Image: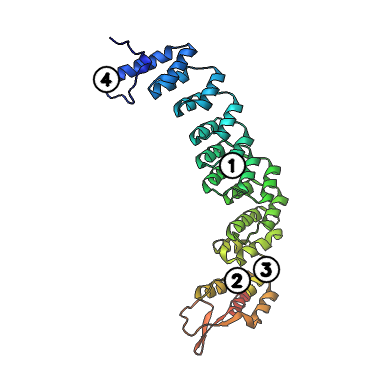
């Protein structure tokens, strides 16, 4: 008659019957009662069941032994269970940066506190899940900004940008906000929050004057407008509103900019020079004359309006097949003419 197997030798991969359930519970209960380290090691090395082996690891408190199991354990479950019980940041750091198993590295990363090592992992690990875990654990804003300078993966950037937005929402130091705003390296959402919280007039004026980009003119002009509207002396930011109006990409901001623009010289320049640039065709032409007309209707300087009335360059002949009929279009013989001077005449009568 054979010897009875120890309770911890339960060898089913899953519980399929009431008998199996009782045997499994008996095995786990036995392991949880063991305090002898040698016996626990025996269970870890020989128990057929993954659950029983990890339960034995969970009973160990010796940090040196746990370190060995975390690094050299015979299976994934043993290693991760041991790793989660470690306190030594140097061991955790070593596993996070050098282990060949990405799932083990990811667990270690979530236990790390060293910000510089986390930043190193974000920049250098080959597995995106490990990098995302590291990004999610970084709180040092200087390191986050540094990573974002060169980060290409949109998932990692999304995590870090969210952290920048959280920081912006919580920051109250005006000097810090102004300094960050002047660096102009944030996403539009972060820029918006920072400018919203700024009160320093010089810093706001700097942003209004200097936030410029040909690659993303709409978002940059949104922020310029936001800063300009907070400047107390609106005479100082009139050119900002004119820039926004003159940029075809910012057509959704145009009416708001017109409401803020009162500089007659700038309005005159828009009336004379506004162009839709690379946009072609009929829509381009209508947009151009509508913007120029809007500028003329905002002018309050009679002498400037008189100059416009005498400017023949503000008269355009339309294609004979053109079917548009805006207010400033009238017929002359077989031709249709757009004469912006008529708008200036009407405006002059109002003044």
Whole-percent x, y for residue 74 in the image: 46, 26
Nearest the viewer among 26 and 209 is 26
Numbered disc 3: secondary structure: helix
Q: Mark 1 points at which residue?
A: 124
| Label ID, residue 266 | 3
Numbered disc 2: secondary structure: helix
Graded by Cα atoms within 10 Å as few (under 14), some (14 to 19) or many (20 or more), the crowding at tag 3 reads some
CA gap between label 1 and label 2 equals: 59 Å
CA gap between label 3 and label 1 equals: 51 Å
Whole-percent x, y for residue 244 in the image: 62, 63
Graded by Cα atoms within 10 Å as few (under 14), some (14 to 19) or many (20 or more), the crowding at tag 2 reads some
CA gap between label 4 and label 1 equals: 50 Å
Numbered disc 4: secondary structure: helix
Q: Earlier in the sequence, mark 1 or mark 2?
A: 1
CA gap between label 2 and label 4 equals: 88 Å
Q: In which quarter of the image is the N terminus?
A: top left
CA gap between label 4 and label 3 equals: 87 Å
Q: Residue furthest front?
A: 1
Q: Mark 4 points at which residue?
A: 18
Q: Earlier in the sequence, mark 2 or mark 4?
A: 4
Numbered disc 1: secondary structure: helix
Asked whether disc 4 touches disc 1, contact meaning CB atoms under 8 Å apart, the reply is no
Q: Earlier in the sequence, mark 3 or mark 1?
A: 1
Q: Nearer the viewer, mark 1 or mark 2?
A: 1
| Label ID, residue 23 | none
Q: Which of marks 4 and 3 is nearer the N terminus?
A: 4
CA gap between label 3 and label 2 equals: 13 Å
């Amino acid at each position: 008659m054979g010897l009875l197997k120890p309770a911890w030798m339960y060898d089913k991969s899953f519980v399929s019957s009431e008998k199996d359930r009782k045997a499994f519970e008996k095995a786990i209960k036995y392991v949880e009662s063991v305090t002898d380290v040698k016996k626990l090691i025996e269970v870890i090395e020989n128990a057929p069941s993954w659950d029983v082996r990890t339960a034995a690891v969970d009973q160990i408190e010796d940090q040196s032994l746990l370190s060995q199991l975390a690094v050299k354990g015979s299976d994934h479950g043993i290693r991760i269970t041991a790793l989660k019980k470690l306190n030594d940041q140097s061991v955790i750091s070593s596993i996070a940066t050098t282990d060949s198993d990405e799932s083990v590295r990811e667990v270690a990363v979530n236990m790390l506190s060293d910000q510089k090592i986390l930043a190193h992992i974000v920049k250098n690990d080959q597995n995106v899940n490990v990098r995302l875990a590291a990004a999610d654990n970084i709180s040092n804003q200087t390191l986050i900004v540094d990573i974002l300078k060169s980060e290409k993966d949109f998932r990692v950037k999304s995590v870090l940008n969210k952290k920048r937005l959280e920081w912006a929402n919580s920051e109250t130091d005006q000097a810090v906000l102004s300094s960050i705003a002047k660096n102009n390296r944030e996403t539009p959402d972060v820029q918006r929050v920072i400018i919203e919280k700024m009160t320093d007039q010089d810093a706001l004026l700097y942003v209004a004057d200097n936030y410029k980009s040909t690659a993303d003119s709409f978002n940059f002009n949104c922020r310029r407008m936001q800063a300009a509207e907070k400047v107390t002396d609106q005479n100082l930011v009139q050119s900002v509103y004119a820039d926004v109006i003159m940029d075809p990409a910012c057509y959704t901001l145009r009416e708001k900019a017109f409401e803020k623009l009162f500089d007659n010289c700038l309005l005159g320049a828009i009336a004379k020079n506004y162009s839709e640039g690379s946009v072609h065709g009929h829509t381009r032409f209508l947009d151009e004359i509508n913007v120029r007309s809007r500028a003329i209707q905002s002018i309050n300087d009679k002498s400037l309006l008189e100059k416009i009335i005498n400017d023949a360059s503000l008269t355009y002949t339309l294609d004979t097949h053109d079917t548009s009929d805006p207010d400033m279009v009238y017929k002359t013989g077989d031709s249709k003419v757009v004469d912006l001077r008529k708008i200036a005449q009407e405006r002059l009568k109002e003044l």
